[in-house]
Image (spheres, helix red, strand yellow):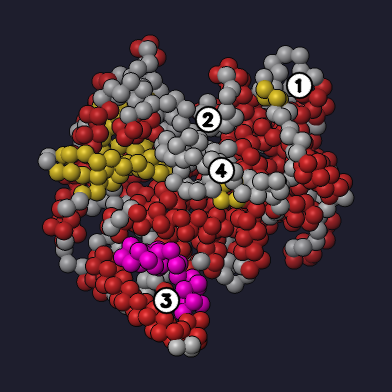
Amino acid sequence: MASANRKKVLLKVIILGDSGVGKTSLMNQYVNKRFSNQYKATIGADFLTRELVVDDRVVTMQLWDTAGQERFQSLGVAFYRGADCCVLVYDVNSSKSFEALDGWRDEFLVQASPHDPENFPFVVLGNKIDMEESKRMVSQKRAMTWCQAKGNIPYFETSAKEAINVEQAFQTIAKNALAQEAETELYADYPDPIRIDSDSSQNYGPCSC
Amino acid sequence: MSRIDEKAGGWEAVRDAEVDAAVNAHDEDRLRRLSVMPGGFGSRSARCRAWLELLRVERLQSTPSSPETTRFATPETDAETVVYTPHQDEGQVLLDTRRAFVTYPRDISSDAKADMQEDLTALICTVLQRHPALSYFQGFHDIATVMYLTFLSKVPRPREGATAQDREEWDTLVRATEVVALSRTRDGMGKDLGPMMGMLKLLRRVLAAADPGLYRISASISPVPTLPFFALSWILTLFSHDVDTLAPVQRIFDYLIARNPISAIYLAVAILMSKKRQMLKLAADLGPEVRLDPSLLHPLFQRLPPLYSDTPDEPTPPPGFHDPNAEARGKFDEPNPYTPIALSGIFQLADKLQAKHPFDGSRVRAHEVLGSGSVVRTYVLELGEQLDEQAKVDEKAALKAWTLADAEACIDKDVVLPGGDQLDDEEPVPWPDRLGGLARSRRIVTTITIGVLLIGVGAALYRSTGRYRLAAWWTTFMRRDISWARAYLGQYVPALRDL
């Protein structure tokens, strides 16, 4: 199974964070190399894909964009499951969005229920560093301290608007996701008797005739 | 400031007269019939009158039934003299209205847009402040946008020198939006989205009853069996979040405002069925990766086709209507891969679906999901009709006229039944799982392909010898609910695709 899977690697990445921190903008900057300050608010979830090379392997990264308002969080389970990496985004000019990271991380771990929550790869992005320094509310030191305390989460300061650090951040995201995917394959390789025969008699198509 | 112009087409004058006659007669049935016709409620001003009638704005706001209702300020008392406490969700409102008016109206200056965003914030916050028990959801601002652009004859509203008419229009706008929040989208404005999960569960059942093949595919596009989340923004925002131009979304509002709020799920299913053929072709174009990861289909499900607001004069899109590269792009700047579909046909299908699979019938079973506090239940109470068994018992309750205060009291009260927001249906969720299913489905597809070809050859032979029976059976077979399989098989046998 693993060898068949070598041909094509699909990495699933979930992007979480408070409303308005720039999740959609970061994705669009990375995938379409464009910025607009006029993206509609995201409702539910949607994704973009981009192919890239990581460690000499061509991988397709599926980036899932999500709604920031808290009431949409509970929908997570449908989308989070099977994720290879989770990106937590906050706005360096908003303490509230930084303080919410704990909640987003916990919620993700509960809903995605990865095999090894302790070592599941997260990446933190502090976005909107293009704004003037006087508006900055969260220092780099404060953010890095949090990331270290949570098991050395890689941290990047980005600007989706000016394309600062976006490419680098997503390269790291892909790399860590790929490592996680390899891990998942190990689990998938265990023979699973239920899976093999459970629905081989199931009708897939014109059964309703 | 730009005037929202009204075209004076021939059909429009006729339609306006029909709408006015129905409004004056308080004839909701007639309005319902008009709402599905090409052109819908006609001009902007006729549309306003129809919406006000169908939202029952006068009735709900003019019949106080308890001292509480004095809180619902009348136009006279309200004119910026009543001071309300800021609502807790105003921060979120601001984050969203800042991103409003993105795809329409076109050609407005950035100053005008900023003023319009300010107006929109004021509109939403006024509604929330008057009814603090409501919670705001992201996407309500899209609904409010449609209300704003429909009820005001010029936008942004004048910053100074507002006339009496300007003030009256604004007041009407606020009152109508209040009713939309409390009578139509209330189930999504409680403490969480649980009731909307219930609605998605019902949508799933309607789809399973109406189109089992499409239902099966829709059920396979997320990593775990789940509710059809791709349709959440459709039903939560009455499609206003996903439609990129004003005219079609106004027509959708014509349709929905004229009906029980449950109608949104039938409309969603009608849209899915209408775009199915195109969707399966697009899915086939995605290649074998789809079978590795069916979630690749998610965007195809979620994306609405360009919805064409057909009129009696222009029943089909004029040439050049749909240029995927020129028209308003979706959220990620990606062109819409679908070709346009006219709305009247979709509305007719939605009505048929609702008649065939009523929400309290054996297939949809809304009584297992929705409680007495849901908008779907209280919609009929608004007319004061004695339709509810409980109400018959409690005569006093039956006689009491329904007001917005009653609606407000239903927030978070018995909206969705315990478990009604959970996916616990027995409906099977098949189709390839991520890896194991691949080889299996290929084998099955091959088997079916061979079988289908054999039957086809047999049919042809019978036909050529004058025996039509098998040929007729074959035709029936192909017309039944297996068109998804045709598209699927079409990857292997291209000729089948266009059957």
Identify the residue at horizontal 16%, vertical 39% (top origin): A54
Q: Hey, which quadrant is residue B349 in on the image?
A: bottom right
Q: First in sequence: mark 2 or mark 4?
A: 2
Image position, residue B498 (x, y; %):
43, 63
Is the residue A172 above or below the residue A182 in the image? above
Question: Label 2, label 4: how many angstroms apart (C-alpha)?
Answer: 26 Å
Q: Nearer the viewer, residue A99 or B188?
A: B188
Image position, residue B366 (x, y; %):
60, 63
Horizontally, residue A5 falls left or right of residue B332, namely left
B313 inside magenta stretch: no
Q: Amino acid at mark 1?
A: Thr
Identify the residue at horizontal 36%, vertical 38% (top origin): A16
Residue assigned mark 1: B81
Have a look at marks 4 and 3 and say if they share a chain.
no
Residue assigned mark 2: B102
Q: Can residue B253 be seen at all in this image of the molecule?
A: no
Horizontally, residue B189 falls left or right of residue B52, namely left
Is the residue B3 above or below the residue B344 in the image? above
Identify the residue at horizontal 66%, vertical 32% (top origin): B149
Q: Residues within 10 Å of mark 1 (few under 14, many from 20)?
A: few
Report in which chain the residue with disc 2 lies: B
Q: What range is drawn magenta here?
A: B473-499
Is the residue B247 above or below the residue A29 in the image? below
